[in-house]
Image (cartoon, rainbow, N blue to C red):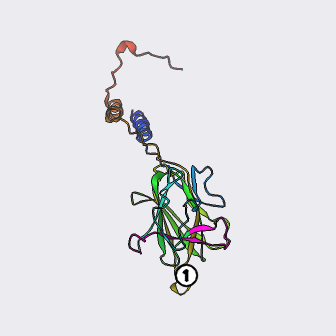
Amino acid sequence: MLKKKLIIISLTTGLLMTFMGQEQVQAASLQNTVGIATPILTINLNELSPPPPNFTSITNQFSTVNGQAGVIFSNTVIPAPSNGLFYITSLASFPNIGQEAVSNLNGFTSFSIKFVETQTEAAFSMVTDLTTATFTAKKGGTVVESFSTTTNLTQTNNFFGFTDVQTGFDEILIELNRINNNAIPSARIGAIQLGGGQPEPEEIPEPTFVFGLLAIALLGTKLPRKPLSTSEVKSYPLK
């Protein structure tokens, strides 16, 4: 009898866990040579016409690109309205970085790419002076996923980001460790890839359905067994 009760409770608990979405979906960090597989929008930082002068502060100039929701750059060191990254054009060649880029100009160690629309995956190319960088995906200021890796000026696997984030994220925070003599490393960001819009809302089961399952479980453990009548008892000969 006890075994039967435990089976009923276990089955009901499993159903509840499934219907209430208790299965954990892990977000995946991304570092490779090409970025995400199928970007919906790629911002190459050459979309402004006319292009701004070198060292122009870039904040929301790429918030809309080709009629689609884009990105906003920010940092917490320089007061608004110059609290973004800085536009630079250069003939210097770096892996996966075009002539146009945005940079911290050795001015601060942390800055963000904020997405106008919530994303489920996004990536960007970046080169830096040799250092360790930490990338953190956030949604509404809450950390969703984070990872750290070495970055430099010559690596070709310099696309960084996140994919398969079912809860979505609206910001990637980049933090750079200081280098020799406590200097701030220079960083340059090239192409930015947006791969997924607003995630599907999670379906939450109706409370009556959940309580119904609980009631079934409890009922199954409490129902009395009807004793067998004398006429229902069969006798078998001893062997």
- The amino acid sitting under disc 1 is Ile
Q: Is residue 97 magenta?
A: yes
Relative height, residue 216 to residue 180 (above, below): above
Q: Quadrant of the N terminus?
A: top left
Q: Residue at x 42, y 70 (%)?
A: 83
Q: Nearer the viewer, residue 178 or 233?
A: 178
Dot 1: within a 10 Å radius of its alpha carbon, few (fewer than 14), some, or many (20 or more) residues?
few
Residue where numbered disc 1 is placed? 179
Dominant SS of magenta comes to loop
Relative height, residue 149 to residue 63 (above, below): below
Total numbered badges shown on the rendered structure: 1
x then y, percent, for residue 50: 55, 63
Q: Residue at x 45, y 62 (%)?
A: 60
x then y, percent, for residue 26: 51, 52
Q: Residue at x 31, y 32 (%)?
A: 208
Question: Which quadrant holds residue 46?
Answer: bottom right
Q: Is residue 83 magenta?
A: yes
User: Which SS class for mark 1?
Assistant: loop
Q: Quadrant of the C terminus?
A: top right
Magenta stretch, residue numbers: 78-101
Left or right position of 122 against 11: right
Relative height, residue 217 to residue 112 (above, below): above
x then y, percent, for residue 145: 48, 59
x then y, percent, for residue 30: 58, 59
Quick check: can you spot residue 162? no
Question: Which quadrant holds residue 22?
Answer: top left
Relative height, residue 164 to residue 239 (above, below): below
Quick check: can you spot residue 109? yes
